[in-house]
Amino acid sequence: MTATLLDVARLAQVSEATASRVLRDKGPISRQARESVLAAVEKLGYLPNRAAGALASAASPLVGVILPSMTNIVFPEVLRGINAGLAGTGYQALVGITDYDLSVEQSLVTSLLAWSPAAIITTGFHHTESTRRRLGQGKARVVELMDIDAEPIDIAVGLSHRKAGEAVARHLFEKGYRRFGYVGHDWNSDRRARLRYDGLCGELARNGLELVDQTLFDGLSSVGAGREMLARLLRRRSDLDIVVFSNDDMALGGLFHCLATGIRVKQELSLFGFNGLEIGDVAPLRLSTLRSNRFLIGKTAVEAIFEPRSSLHTKVVHDTGFEIIEGETA
Amino acid sequence: MTATLLDVARLAQVSEATASRVLRDKGPISRQARESVLAAVEKLGYLPNRAAGALASAASPLVGVILPSMTNIVFPEVLRGINAGLAGTGYQALVGITDYDLSVEQSLVTSLLAWSPAAIITTGFHHTESTRRRLGQGKARVVELMDIDAEPIDIAVGLSHRKAGEAVARHLFEKGYRRFGYVGHDWNSDRRARLRYDGLCGELARNGLELVDQTLFDGLSSVGAGREMLARLLRRRSDLDIVVFSNDDMALGGLFHCLATGIRVKQELSLFGFNGLEIGDVAPLRLSTLRSNRFLIGKTAVEAIFEPRSSLHTKVVHDTGFEIIEGETA
DNA sequence: CTGTTAGCGCATTCAT
DNA sequence: ATGAATGCGCTAACAG
């Protein structure tokens, strides 16, 4: 039916072992052998059976990727970075989505591990005990994405959200803002938003300030939620000079609220986001925000996986940084 | 090291075959056997080795997913639908991104097939000859997503983009619009945008009209491109009463252009999009557009895969439909 | 540099 | 309803 390695070996007049070596260029191979094997592969249209390879070697060219959401535009970008990093390596991404449910993450880790992947890439430091145990004891590399504010199981790739929050506070304080409002979303599912909030408040406190008021949406972030929550905040307080949002989705909603209701942005009220979404660049007013490079996070994660392990218990941390975007809304 | 089926069988005092049957509930099994096997699995923390299973059965609980882009927000939503459909089935998605490059699609098809997946889900009808051949002759089911305007290899799930374009023309004509402009993006990478355009123009012609003018961006769609292209179009013509955009990204850019330059939308100029993005619902003005249900497309695709094949050469087509959204911009 | 020999862990006959 | 035997296609020692 479909050609196997044995067929290739026979046609090339070498042993299976040699044919196998050629295909994975492992070990020393004569030009002779290499050429005839490659010719046979070509001729037969040979496709290696990955399952057989994985079984024999107890390892597979697979990388498990566990993402909390596809709705928050941040994660498609991370996935794009991961796929970009994987492209041309022969490795494939096995993708699962948790919808921010740690028990879903746990069962995904279990099923993904059943493929003996080279690595599991997941998000954040917040896992169930069982997840943590399973991830820690396999031979697969483990990457925890987005955050570097805690000690990783193996590798962390992301930025310090606490420092990002502090940087925002410092930046806005230096620009002269004093009356801060905050519009956020559910902290239970998004711990990193909470860290940014903590950084923001901490730095404000160091400058003798605190938030004047805040509204928290009880659910995932979205443009609609941002719009609604800003409206609610402004109904309560009219004396704010700046509102910081938990992310750009929310901030864009805030901007839309201002545009729709005629609030003059920056003159009457300033807005600041987080994430640096492309759409923020071309909104009627360029959103003032803090850019985290999600594509780079994904790409760096993959590169880190292939980096040789220095020692079995050394943690690796990659800081992909952030950057304040001036914009036109603050 | 890690427990195998043999360990489970021994502990449960049954044969490997029985243990295997229990785990996949295949064939008749006594309560006795089932319970002791399940207990053994629990006790040993047994994890099946998928590679071994795939090798032995020449089939794997994997679905290859090939998407052209992660930047266009439509595809993350499709992927979300696919994952939702897969959740709880024990199947996993093996994801690749082509960046609209058919040769990348071809090599992805090859690598994915090496895992003997249950199905390959890809996008559109436009493939290389080799891709089409490989897909056609495997035992994996094949789904072509988004479009139903041509004959599929096996299964098509999506909507008629031609009819969508016609529906838009009819809707806008009935609302009294006569001077149509069009703002689009690259047709080579996005054939479906071209189909919608054809539908639009065809229906206009049937009503004795044609496009007054159009601008085409030479690249992928984006909010920025939409903004820029509308600006360019309006520099050339000031006598349009409606502009139809190739999709909502582009249309949102157009809306932003109007908001930024003070063009009164719907009074001076109307705008119409395509795709029904969530963000269009909460923009300062709710975008008038045509909604295609991307999540449903992904979910339906997965359901179609598991539908038993009626006959080996019957093509299956699922029309997920579309819906005109009135909005506030047209 | 190459071939020989053994499995890898499971699903699947075919018995019973 | 169960077990024994076989092999899926490949990689990994090891010996030469």
Image (cartoon, coloured by chain):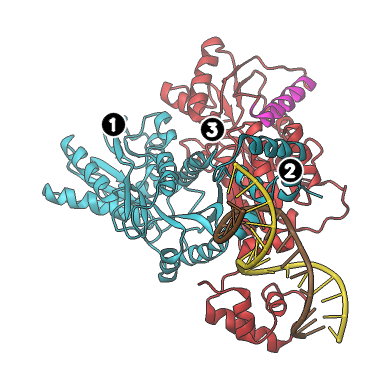
Chain colours: A red, B cyan, C brown, D yellow
Q: Which residue is mark 3?
A: A249
Foreground: A318 or B112? Answer: B112
Residue B327 in the magenta stretch? The answer is: no
Q: How many angstroms separate mark 2 from mark 3 (CA)?
A: 57 Å
Residue A214 spot, x, y in % from top left: 62, 17
Can the viewer see residue A89? no
Residue at mark 3 shares a chain with residue at mark 1: no
Label 1: chain letter: B
Marks 2 and 3 in Cβ contact (< 8 Å): no
Residue B324 spot, x, y in % from top left: 28, 36
Q: Which residue is mark 1?
A: B326
Badge 1 density bin: few <14, some 14–19, many ≥20, Cα 10 Å = some
Q: Quadrant of residue A168?
A: top right
Q: Amino acid at mark 3?
A: Asp
Q: Residue at x 63, y 77 (%)?
A: A6
Give the structural element (helix, strand or loop) at label 3.
Answer: helix
| In this picture, residue B315 sits left or right of residue C8 | left
Residue A143 spot, x, y in % from top left: 73, 46
Q: Amino acid at mark 1?
A: Glu
Q: Which residue is mark 2?
A: B13
Q: Quadrant of the C terminus of chain B?
A: top left
Badge 3 density bin: few <14, some 14–19, many ≥20, Cα 10 Å = many
Instruction: Give, as a single range, the part of the protein colored magenta.
Output: A189-206
Q: Quadrant of residue B191?
A: bottom left
Q: Amino acid at mark 2?
A: Gln
Q: Residue at x 78, y 58 (%)?
A: A307
Give the structural element (helix, strand or loop) at label 1.
Answer: loop
| In this picture, residue B310 sits left or right of residue A13 | left
Foreground: B182 or A24? Answer: A24
Residue at mark 2 shares a chain with residue at mark 1: yes
Secondary structure that dominates the magenta span: helix
Q: Residue at x 65, y 87 (%)?
A: A13
